[in-house]
Amino acid sequence: MNPRNLSYCLMVGLFCAGGSAHGQWVTFQNQSGVRINAAPAVSTADPEEKDYAWGDVDQDGDVDLVCVRKNPFSTPGGKTNVLFMNVNGVLTDQTATYATASDVPGDQGFLTETNDRDVLLVDLDLDGWLDIVTATTVSDGLSKVIGHPRIYRNLGEIGGVWQGFRHEDFRIPQMLSVNNVVANPRFCSVAVGDVTGDGYPDIYFGDYDSGQTGPSENPNNDFDNKLLVNLGAGNPGVFVDQSTMRMGSSFNYPGVGVRNYLYSTFGAASIICDINGDGINDVVKQTALTPPQHVAVVMNDPSNVGFFNNYKIVNSQAPYFVSAGDLNNDNRLDLVTTDDNADRYLLNTGNDANGAPNFNTFSFSFQAGGDDGFGSQSIIVDLNNDGWKDVFISDVDVDGFGCIRRAHIYRNLGNAPNVTLREDSPSVIPTGNLVGTYHSAIFDINGDGYNDIVLGRCNTMEVWINIPPVSINYTFIGGAPQAVEPATARLLEVDVVPVNGALQPGSVTLFYSINGGAFSSTPMTHVSGDRYTASLPAAECGDFIRYYIRGQLVGGGTFYSPSTAPAATYRATVATGEAVSLESFEVSDAGWTVQNDPSLTGGAWVRVDPVGTISGVNQAQPEDDYEGPPNVMCWVTGQGVPGGAVGAADVDGGPTHLISPPIDLSGSDAVIRYARWFFGSTGDSMVVAVSNDNGVNWTTVETITTSASAWTLASFRVSDYFQNQALSANVRVRFSVADTGTNTTCEGAIDAFEVTSTVCEAGCNCPGNTNGDGQRNGLDIAGFVNCLLGNPGVCSCADINNNGLDMNDIPLFVNEILNGQDCAS
């Protein structure tokens, strides 16, 4: 039930995929018929419980699969195991060839029936080859050879020929029960990792007592969890039981009392990993079914490595499995718990004073349906190669609740730090193919760089191949232009790169529209490599051009830039330059107005030198404006008196609206920048909106609901919100703050409102006067340099020779400045 295979338990998210199902974010195809070469009884018609480990065991570059099998649920009776070698992307049963050797006379390795519940692939003796270790259960009264965990040593190569595996019984010691009785364990999980700091991997087993199915356990034969330590350099890959010596410290378990750290009632999952980031491996422990049901972190003592000195319970619902991995890309290991009720994920927020991690707990979300309870193994894995690890949770409770539920696949939306994990609908693998899943294996079967899924189900084994996404990537050289010169065709250079496909020759096309008219098209010219060119048509100053690119792949598939074209397009305004207007609110209201909803009882917008307020330890209203001295004024929502209560003048009800005067953008476009402040609680918000019709209709630009307790700069391009409209002389911006919470503090503030608009200049009657002040002197140098670098300014006056601004204008500009004549009035 444990997905860890290649490392000592770092729960690394592998890449996964799936099948004849088409989802928005990943596509899988059921290729079981061509990806499995094995007898149906051990593959496509296998009714047994299955657990997997995967890795490149023969070092041929392909990932292979180990499958351990047992009677379903917590019952006795062994089954043979299977070694699936990856042969050119086909999982091929080569057990008889590579996994039957043993150091025990008469034993047949994998073909000896054992009752194995968990398996890992890891290099136990550090010879560079992956070995196999199993966790064996319910084998009461049988010999140690059958009833104890097994190690199958990888024999490596001789003369370039891989030799396979050999079961070596001497590597695992005869273990004793809690009462020091020679017996066989009932292990349900195995974890591997170096806990002693010598570089050699050690083994930790999770034990369980009597389950809800199967025979009861003789109390004298009861094991707790076990820690087997690798003898290391002197005898690598041979293990001794040092469980109580290293993990024998006491803990007061809720509902049970004082026991040592090894105490367990149903240890279905175990992990060795550095959970607190101190560079030393710890243990994550799960115990279920009967008290004390919980997940705990057991901390390795950094001052005495290999000995554990801190035990912390981090989840105490009804957890049945736990896995670890970094879900929010903060370089901390998070946890996923499979629960008899609702599954959860725990985000690591850093360590407490004792060096143990703290976690915030979250529930999975669903586009349709919900969690159907119980479940088992989970894997934290990036399914769609977007850099965010998703989660796969199998459904079959190994203690005997049948095959009536289904596995769940949760997409990580990447909205850090508190990421959302959501099951999308429809499922990326049809739900009927997820019913009754014991275990899954996730790795790249066919070598295409995308990892695939093997499903170990109650009555079958299935292979779901990741169908790599196809697309076309477009990259504008120098960026997609947002402003172009009048009466001049603008050349576009675009790199067009197919992804997992080939471009259909002649399919790359530029579409354009002037002033909201019908789109015209022109083929783009293939220059060389990935580079294509085409030109936007010449247009008059004040016009606007919408444009997009379309390309097609051989065999089908049409892709656009921007991706949602023609509904959304690029837009360029025809202009000669840019003008910047900044309102700091220092002198007057400058035409800004306030409108209040009738529900507002306090906190209307007011222009003031703000009086700061503190809510708890957080700044609720700023003490200073954004720009700082000598400026002091800004707009805030209500102004209290110095030393007054934090909520005395904040927003209550609302919203209260702060509305700009009309902004003339006729024949133009603009980027509007502003500094905003928002502080609030659940239900409070600041909404920024823009209108193109003098405030008759409003379009939302952004909604802020998260407190920052600091000034934040924001900006937007006006035309992005009116794609197919000419901008008017009556563009307005509105800032609205509302407090719809109960007894909450809600504050907003606005400052430094800046409009950078495109302009149409009639030409320059004073060459060199780049700052527009009517004089030619040293104050124009900065403007000239800005224009030369492509930045906004009165750039027609920088083009001294009227043939386009370039390096040839530099000496001419210097002459104009040295002459120093004022411009003609």
Image (tube, helix red, strand yellow):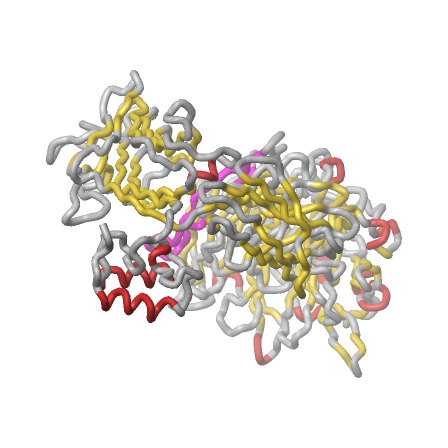
Q: Residue furthest front?
A: 824
Task: Give the camera-side residue of 805 and 371.
Answer: 805
Residue at left offset 40%, top offset 66%: 302
Residue 359 is covered by the magenta coloring: yes
Residue 401 falls left or right of residue 204 = right
Q: Position of residue 757 (x, y in %)?
A: 37, 44
The secondary structure that most of the magenta stretch takes on is: strand
Residue at left offset 30%, top offset 32%: 660
Residue 600 is covered by the magenta coloring: no
Residue at left offset 55%, top offset 51%: 388
Task: Give the camera-side residue of 555 and 591.
Answer: 591
Q: Residue furthest left?
A: 642
Q: Position of residue 423 (x, y in %)?
A: 61, 38
Task: Give the camera-side residue of 476 and 636.
Answer: 476
Above or below for 238 versus 741: below
State the extent of the magenta-drawn residues as a range: 343-366
Q: Is residue 288 visible?
A: no
Residue 163 falls left or right of residue 302 = right
Q: Position of residue 216 (x, y in %)?
A: 67, 42
Q: Residue furthest bottom?
A: 159
Q: Position of residue 176 (x, y in %)?
A: 60, 60
Above or below for 260 versus 279: above
Q: Is residue 552 visible?
A: yes
Above or below for 254 versus 124: above
